[in-house]
């Protein structure tokens, strides 16, 4: 809605989607299709609850910075051109933490902190 300059005026109806499967064996092709659909749905749900974070962090405080950011996996750490004191960090982390966490990261010496939405993800 926001992307098109629209806003919610009134909720007419709330609904919920359910995927229902009968008990017993299913043809492999159908089971593969259901598994693929479930993986995609779970990826969208997980992406909504996560953010992609990029920042510059001091090399001597990396362990402290990483400890603040519970992530899907270990962060990607890249050297910064011409700067031996800091590195670039990229990682996926839980969205629930964010303003307080950003302030703590800044206090540890992190800079250029970017928090981006994730559209889809698959582990």
Image: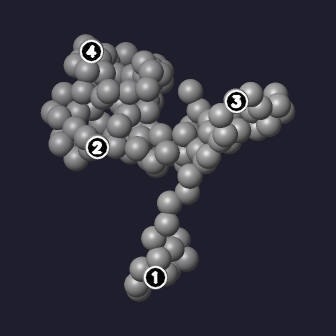
Q: CA distance from mark 2 to mark 3?
A: 39 Å
Q: CA distance from mark 1 to mark 2?
A: 29 Å
According to the picture, the residue beneath numbered tag 4 turns out to be 63
Label 2 sits on a secondary structure element that is helix
State left or right for residue 18 relative to residue 116. Answer: right
Q: Is residue 49 visible?
A: yes
Q: Nearer the viewer, mark 2 or mark 4?
A: 2
Residue 60: x and y in percent read 25, 13
According to the picture, the residue beneath numbered tag 1 turns out to be 12
Label 3 sits on a secondary structure element that is loop
Label 1 sits on a secondary structure element that is loop
Residue 120: x and y in percent read 58, 43
Q: Is residue 16 above or below residue 76?
A: below
Q: CA distance from mark 1 to mark 4?
A: 49 Å
Q: Nearer the viewer, mark 2 or mark 3?
A: 3
According to the picture, the residue beneath numbered tag 2 turns out to be 96
State left or right for residue 49 relative to residue 66. Answer: right
Image point 39% across, 22% down: which residue?
Answer: 87
Taking depth in this image into account, of 5 and 24 the one nearest to the observer is 24
Residue 11: x and y in percent read 42, 80
Q: CA distance from mark 2 to mark 4?
A: 21 Å
According to the picture, the residue beneath numbered tag 3 turns out to be 24
Q: Earlier in the sequence, mark 1 or mark 4?
A: 1
Quadrant position of the C terminus in the picture:
top right
Pointer 2: residues within 10 angstroms few (<14), some, or many (20+)? few
Image point 49% across, 66% down: which residue?
Answer: 15
Pointer 1: residues within 10 angstroms few (<14), some, or many (20+)? few
Q: Nearer the viewer, mark 3 or mark 4?
A: 3
Image quarter of residue 37: top right
């Amino acid at each position: 809605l926001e992307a098109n300059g629209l806003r919610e005026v009134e909720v007419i109806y709330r609904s919920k989607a359910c995927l229902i499967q009968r008990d017993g064996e299913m043809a492999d092709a159908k089971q593969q299709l259901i598994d693929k659909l479930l993986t995609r749905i779970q990826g969208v749900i997980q992406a909504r609850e996560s953010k992609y974070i990029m920042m510059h962090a001091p090399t001597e405080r990396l362990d402290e910075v990483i400890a603040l950011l519970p992530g899907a996996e270990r962060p990607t750490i890249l050297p910064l051109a011409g700067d031996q004191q800091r590195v670039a960090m990229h990682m996926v982390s839980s969205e629930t933490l964010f303003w307080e966490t950003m302030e703590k990261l800044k206090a540890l010496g992190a800079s250029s902190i970017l928090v981006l939405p994730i559209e889809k993800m698959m582990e």
